[in-house]
Amino acid sequence: MADIRLHESWRTPLAGVAFATLFVSARASAQGATGTVAGLVTAAIVLAAHSAEADDARSAQRAAVAAWAFAGFAVLAEGRPILLVGCWMHARRYFVKALEAKDVRAAEPLQLIGKIYEVERASKEAGDSHQQRYERRQRDMVPLLDELERWKDENAGVVPPNEPLGRAWTYLRNHWDILAVVVQDGALELDNGEVERVIRGPALGRRNWLFAGSDEGAERAATILTVLETAKRAGVDIREYLRDVLWKVAGGWKQARLDELLPHVWAAARRESAAATDDVELGTSVG
Protein backbone atom coordinates (compact mmCIF):
# COMPACT_ATOMS: atom_id res chain seq x y z
CA MET A 1 0.00 0.00 0.00
CA ALA A 2 1.31 3.42 -0.89
CA ASP A 3 2.45 5.46 2.11
CA ILE A 4 -0.11 8.08 3.08
CA ARG A 5 1.29 11.58 2.76
CA LEU A 6 0.47 13.30 6.01
CA HIS A 7 -0.13 17.03 6.01
CA GLU A 8 2.85 18.92 7.43
CA SER A 9 0.64 20.38 10.16
CA TRP A 10 0.03 16.84 11.46
CA ARG A 11 3.49 17.06 12.99
CA THR A 12 2.87 20.42 14.62
CA PRO A 13 2.62 20.28 18.44
CA LEU A 14 -0.78 21.12 19.89
CA ALA A 15 -0.34 21.50 23.62
CA GLY A 16 -2.79 21.99 26.45
CA VAL A 17 -5.62 19.64 25.51
CA ALA A 18 -5.89 15.97 26.38
CA PHE A 19 -9.23 15.17 24.73
CA ALA A 20 -12.07 17.35 23.54
CA THR A 21 -15.42 16.95 21.84
CA LEU A 22 -15.80 19.77 19.35
CA PHE A 23 -19.09 20.96 17.88
CA VAL A 24 -19.02 23.26 14.87
CA SER A 25 -21.65 25.57 13.39
CA ALA A 26 -22.61 25.32 9.72
CA ARG A 27 -24.62 27.33 7.25
CA ALA A 28 -27.52 25.86 5.32
CA SER A 29 -30.06 27.30 2.90
CA ALA A 30 -33.28 25.84 1.57
CA GLN A 31 -34.12 26.09 -2.12
CA GLY A 32 -36.48 28.99 -2.72
CA ALA A 33 -35.76 30.62 0.62
CA THR A 34 -35.29 34.36 0.62
CA GLY A 35 -32.21 34.19 2.78
CA THR A 36 -29.75 31.90 4.43
CA VAL A 37 -30.17 30.88 8.04
CA ALA A 38 -27.41 29.62 10.27
CA GLY A 39 -28.16 26.09 11.38
CA LEU A 40 -26.60 24.29 14.29
CA VAL A 41 -24.60 21.46 12.84
CA THR A 42 -25.94 18.05 13.88
CA ALA A 43 -22.53 16.44 13.94
CA ALA A 44 -19.82 16.52 16.55
CA ILE A 45 -16.14 15.85 16.11
CA VAL A 46 -14.01 13.97 18.59
CA LEU A 47 -10.75 15.86 18.71
CA ALA A 48 -7.94 13.88 20.30
CA ALA A 49 -5.09 16.27 20.85
CA HIS A 50 -2.60 13.98 22.50
CA SER A 51 -0.46 15.69 25.09
CA ALA A 52 3.08 14.94 26.20
CA GLU A 53 1.64 12.36 28.59
CA ALA A 54 0.59 10.15 25.65
CA ASP A 55 1.97 6.63 25.88
CA ASP A 56 4.17 6.95 22.80
CA ALA A 57 5.97 9.66 20.87
CA ARG A 58 4.02 8.97 17.67
CA SER A 59 0.82 10.39 19.16
CA ALA A 60 2.36 13.01 21.43
CA GLN A 61 2.11 15.95 19.05
CA ARG A 62 -0.95 15.31 16.94
CA ALA A 63 -4.61 16.09 16.72
CA ALA A 64 -7.09 13.89 14.89
CA VAL A 65 -10.65 14.54 13.79
CA ALA A 66 -12.96 11.62 13.15
CA ALA A 67 -14.74 12.55 9.93
CA TRP A 68 -17.25 11.19 7.45
CA ALA A 69 -18.83 12.49 4.24
CA PHE A 70 -19.02 16.17 5.14
CA ALA A 71 -16.92 18.55 3.03
CA GLY A 72 -16.78 21.09 5.84
CA PHE A 73 -14.26 18.96 7.70
CA ALA A 74 -11.62 19.64 5.05
CA VAL A 75 -12.09 23.37 5.63
CA LEU A 76 -11.83 22.83 9.37
CA ALA A 77 -8.51 21.00 9.02
CA GLU A 78 -6.93 23.37 6.50
CA GLY A 79 -3.92 25.15 7.95
CA ARG A 80 -4.40 23.55 11.37
CA PRO A 81 -2.56 20.72 13.14
CA ILE A 82 -5.42 18.35 12.40
CA LEU A 83 -5.55 15.09 10.49
CA LEU A 84 -8.88 13.91 9.11
CA VAL A 85 -9.57 10.26 9.84
CA GLY A 86 -12.23 8.40 7.86
CA CYS A 87 -14.97 6.18 9.25
CA TRP A 88 -14.85 2.50 8.28
CA MET A 89 -18.30 2.00 9.79
CA HIS A 90 -19.78 4.35 7.18
CA ALA A 91 -17.81 2.72 4.36
CA ARG A 92 -19.04 -0.70 5.44
CA ARG A 93 -22.68 0.41 5.47
CA TYR A 94 -22.58 1.17 1.75
CA PHE A 95 -21.37 -2.34 0.95
CA VAL A 96 -23.96 -3.87 3.28
CA LYS A 97 -26.68 -2.03 1.33
CA ALA A 98 -25.21 -3.35 -1.92
CA LEU A 99 -25.24 -6.92 -0.62
CA GLU A 100 -28.81 -6.47 0.63
CA ALA A 101 -29.65 -5.40 -2.93
CA LYS A 102 -28.51 -8.91 -4.02
CA ASP A 103 -25.21 -7.76 -5.53
CA VAL A 104 -22.90 -10.59 -4.46
CA ARG A 105 -19.85 -8.65 -5.68
CA ALA A 106 -20.07 -6.69 -2.44
CA ALA A 107 -19.18 -9.82 -0.47
CA GLU A 108 -15.43 -9.55 -1.13
CA PRO A 109 -14.90 -5.97 0.14
CA LEU A 110 -17.23 -6.69 3.06
CA GLN A 111 -15.15 -9.72 4.01
CA LEU A 112 -11.97 -7.65 3.92
CA ILE A 113 -13.51 -4.88 6.03
CA GLY A 114 -14.67 -7.55 8.47
CA LYS A 115 -11.10 -8.82 8.79
CA ILE A 116 -9.89 -5.26 9.39
CA TYR A 117 -12.29 -5.05 12.34
CA GLU A 118 -11.09 -8.45 13.57
CA VAL A 119 -7.56 -7.03 13.79
CA GLU A 120 -8.92 -4.09 15.78
CA ARG A 121 -10.93 -6.34 18.07
CA ALA A 122 -7.87 -8.46 18.81
CA SER A 123 -5.93 -5.31 19.66
CA LYS A 124 -8.55 -4.12 22.13
CA GLU A 125 -8.90 -7.53 23.74
CA ALA A 126 -5.13 -7.68 24.19
CA GLY A 127 -5.13 -4.22 25.79
CA ASP A 128 -2.60 -2.88 23.28
CA SER A 129 -0.95 0.47 23.88
CA HIS A 130 -0.96 2.93 20.96
CA GLN A 131 2.49 1.70 19.96
CA GLN A 132 1.45 -1.96 20.11
CA ARG A 133 -1.71 -1.25 18.14
CA TYR A 134 0.35 0.59 15.53
CA GLU A 135 2.67 -2.42 15.18
CA ARG A 136 -0.27 -4.83 14.99
CA ARG A 137 -1.93 -2.74 12.28
CA GLN A 138 1.28 -2.56 10.28
CA ARG A 139 1.64 -6.32 10.48
CA ASP A 140 -1.96 -7.50 10.07
CA MET A 141 -4.01 -4.62 8.67
CA VAL A 142 -1.77 -3.24 5.92
CA PRO A 143 -2.01 -6.49 3.85
CA LEU A 144 -5.83 -6.32 4.11
CA LEU A 145 -5.83 -2.71 2.95
CA ASP A 146 -3.59 -3.72 0.05
CA GLU A 147 -6.18 -6.30 -1.01
CA LEU A 148 -9.05 -3.84 -0.64
CA GLU A 149 -7.18 -1.17 -2.58
CA ARG A 150 -6.53 -3.70 -5.35
CA TRP A 151 -10.27 -4.53 -5.44
CA LYS A 152 -11.04 -0.81 -5.62
CA ASP A 153 -8.67 -0.25 -8.53
CA GLU A 154 -9.80 -3.34 -10.45
CA ASN A 155 -13.46 -2.29 -10.23
CA ALA A 156 -12.98 1.29 -11.35
CA GLY A 157 -15.70 2.06 -13.91
CA VAL A 158 -17.10 -1.47 -13.76
CA VAL A 159 -20.25 -0.71 -11.75
CA PRO A 160 -22.63 2.14 -12.69
CA PRO A 161 -22.35 4.86 -10.02
CA ASN A 162 -26.12 4.97 -9.44
CA GLU A 163 -26.24 1.33 -8.32
CA PRO A 164 -25.74 0.44 -4.61
CA LEU A 165 -22.35 -1.16 -5.26
CA GLY A 166 -21.36 1.81 -7.43
CA ARG A 167 -22.17 4.17 -4.56
CA ALA A 168 -20.16 1.98 -2.19
CA TRP A 169 -17.20 1.98 -4.58
CA THR A 170 -17.42 5.76 -4.99
CA TYR A 171 -17.44 6.31 -1.23
CA LEU A 172 -14.41 4.04 -0.85
CA ARG A 173 -12.52 5.82 -3.64
CA ASN A 174 -13.34 9.33 -2.46
CA HIS A 175 -12.38 8.62 1.14
CA TRP A 176 -9.56 6.14 0.65
CA ASP A 177 -6.76 8.35 1.96
CA ILE A 178 -8.51 9.26 5.19
CA LEU A 179 -9.69 5.68 5.68
CA ALA A 180 -6.28 4.10 5.16
CA VAL A 181 -4.48 6.60 7.37
CA VAL A 182 -5.39 4.60 10.49
CA VAL A 183 -2.37 2.35 9.95
CA GLN A 184 -0.08 5.34 10.46
CA ASP A 185 -0.88 5.78 14.15
CA GLY A 186 -2.17 3.48 16.86
CA ALA A 187 -4.00 6.37 18.54
CA LEU A 188 -6.44 6.68 15.63
CA GLU A 189 -9.81 4.95 15.82
CA LEU A 190 -11.27 2.88 12.98
CA ASP A 191 -14.64 4.63 13.02
CA ASN A 192 -16.54 7.49 14.60
CA GLY A 193 -18.93 5.39 16.64
CA GLU A 194 -18.06 7.50 19.64
CA VAL A 195 -19.05 10.64 17.74
CA GLU A 196 -22.45 9.18 16.93
CA ARG A 197 -23.01 8.43 20.60
CA VAL A 198 -22.04 11.99 21.51
CA ILE A 199 -24.53 13.60 19.09
CA ARG A 200 -27.55 11.60 20.25
CA GLY A 201 -28.62 14.42 22.57
CA PRO A 202 -28.44 17.18 19.94
CA ALA A 203 -30.00 14.84 17.38
CA LEU A 204 -33.00 14.27 19.65
CA GLY A 205 -33.44 17.98 20.25
CA ARG A 206 -32.70 19.38 16.81
CA ARG A 207 -36.36 19.50 15.75
CA ASN A 208 -36.93 21.98 18.56
CA TRP A 209 -33.85 24.10 17.88
CA LEU A 210 -32.84 23.28 14.33
CA PHE A 211 -32.03 26.89 13.48
CA ALA A 212 -29.95 29.14 15.67
CA GLY A 213 -31.27 32.29 14.00
CA SER A 214 -27.90 33.79 13.15
CA ASP A 215 -24.29 32.85 12.53
CA GLU A 216 -23.37 34.21 15.95
CA GLY A 217 -26.12 32.18 17.62
CA ALA A 218 -24.95 28.98 15.95
CA GLU A 219 -21.36 29.63 16.98
CA ARG A 220 -22.39 30.26 20.57
CA ALA A 221 -24.49 27.09 20.64
CA ALA A 222 -21.60 25.07 19.22
CA THR A 223 -19.27 26.55 21.83
CA ILE A 224 -21.63 25.68 24.68
CA LEU A 225 -22.05 22.09 23.43
CA THR A 226 -18.28 21.80 23.03
CA VAL A 227 -17.67 22.87 26.62
CA LEU A 228 -20.39 20.61 28.04
CA GLU A 229 -19.44 17.47 26.12
CA THR A 230 -15.74 17.99 26.80
CA ALA A 231 -16.53 18.36 30.49
CA LYS A 232 -18.43 15.07 30.34
CA ARG A 233 -15.41 13.46 28.71
CA ALA A 234 -13.24 14.78 31.56
CA GLY A 235 -15.59 13.09 34.04
CA VAL A 236 -16.54 16.25 35.92
CA ASP A 237 -19.84 17.14 37.58
CA ILE A 238 -21.36 19.42 34.92
CA ARG A 239 -23.49 21.41 37.35
CA GLU A 240 -20.57 22.02 39.72
CA TYR A 241 -18.24 22.86 36.83
CA LEU A 242 -20.61 25.43 35.32
CA ARG A 243 -21.37 26.98 38.72
CA ASP A 244 -17.68 27.43 39.49
CA VAL A 245 -16.61 28.59 36.02
CA LEU A 246 -19.47 31.04 35.50
CA TRP A 247 -18.90 32.50 38.96
CA LYS A 248 -15.20 33.00 38.24
CA VAL A 249 -15.78 34.52 34.78
CA ALA A 250 -18.44 36.89 36.14
CA GLY A 251 -16.05 37.86 38.92
CA GLY A 252 -13.42 39.15 36.53
CA TRP A 253 -11.28 36.06 35.89
CA LYS A 254 -8.21 37.14 33.94
CA GLN A 255 -8.13 36.31 30.22
CA ALA A 256 -4.53 35.13 30.59
CA ARG A 257 -5.74 32.38 32.95
CA LEU A 258 -8.67 31.07 30.88
CA ASP A 259 -6.79 27.84 30.16
CA GLU A 260 -7.19 26.99 33.85
CA LEU A 261 -10.95 26.77 33.27
CA LEU A 262 -10.70 24.14 30.53
CA PRO A 263 -12.55 21.02 31.75
CA HIS A 264 -9.56 18.68 32.04
CA VAL A 265 -7.39 21.36 33.71
CA TRP A 266 -10.21 22.32 36.07
CA ALA A 267 -10.79 18.65 36.97
CA ALA A 268 -7.09 18.07 37.66
CA ALA A 269 -6.95 21.14 39.92
CA ARG A 270 -10.01 19.90 41.83
CA ARG A 271 -8.41 16.49 42.36
CA GLU A 272 -5.19 18.09 43.62
CA SER A 273 -7.13 20.35 45.95
CA ALA A 274 -9.15 17.42 47.32
CA ALA A 275 -5.98 15.39 47.86
CA ALA A 276 -4.31 18.29 49.70
CA THR A 277 -7.39 18.70 51.91
CA ASP A 278 -7.36 14.99 52.76
CA ASP A 279 -3.67 15.20 53.70
CA VAL A 280 -4.33 18.17 55.99
CA GLU A 281 -7.29 16.44 57.65
CA LEU A 282 -5.24 13.27 58.09
CA GLY A 283 -2.39 15.25 59.67
CA THR A 284 -4.81 17.01 62.02
CA SER A 285 -6.44 13.76 63.14
CA VAL A 286 -3.07 12.11 63.73
CA GLY A 287 -1.82 15.15 65.67
Image (cartoon, rainbow, N blue to C red):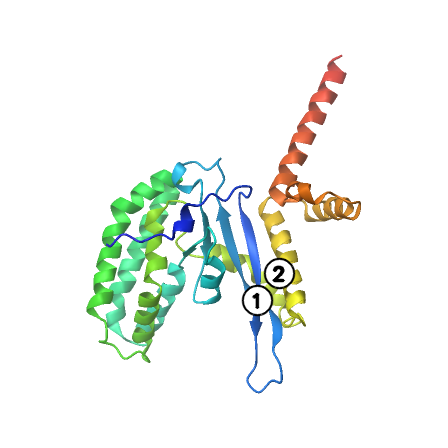
| Marks 1 and 2 close (CB-CB < 8 Å) | yes
Please indicate, yes or no, whether residue 97 appears anywhere in the rendered image: yes
Inter-mark Cα distance, 1 to 2: 8 Å
The outermost residue toward the top is 287
Name the residue carrying label 2.
222
Q: Secondary structure at mark 2?
A: helix
> Position of 114 compared to 199: left or right?
left
Query: Which sits in the foreground, 49 or 170?
Result: 49
Other residues around mark 1 within 10 Å, as few (<14) / some (14–19) / many (≥20) = many
Name the residue carrying label 1.
41
- The quarter of the picture where the C terminus appears is top right
Q: Residue at x 60, y 61 (%)?
A: 201
The kind of residue tagged 2 is: Ala
Based on the displayed image, in which of its 4 quarters is residue 1 positioned? bottom left
The kind of residue tagged 1 is: Val
Q: Residue at x 56, y 66 (%)?
A: 42
Sequence-wise, the earlier of marks 1 and 2 is: 1
Q: Residue at x 79, y 48 (%)?
A: 250
Q: How many marks?
A: 2
Other residues around mark 2 within 10 Å, as few (<14) / some (14–19) / many (≥20) = many
Rendered position, 21 above or below 91: above
Rendered position, 251 above or below 166: above
Based on the displayed image, in which of its 4 quarters is residue 116 positioned? bottom left
| Image spot of residue 236 (x, y percent) | 64, 44
Rendered position, 219 above or below 11: below
Please indicate, yes or no, whether residue 236 appears anywhere in the rendered image: no
Q: Residue at x 51, y 53 (%)?
A: 46
Query: Which sits in the foreground, 174 or 107?
Result: 174
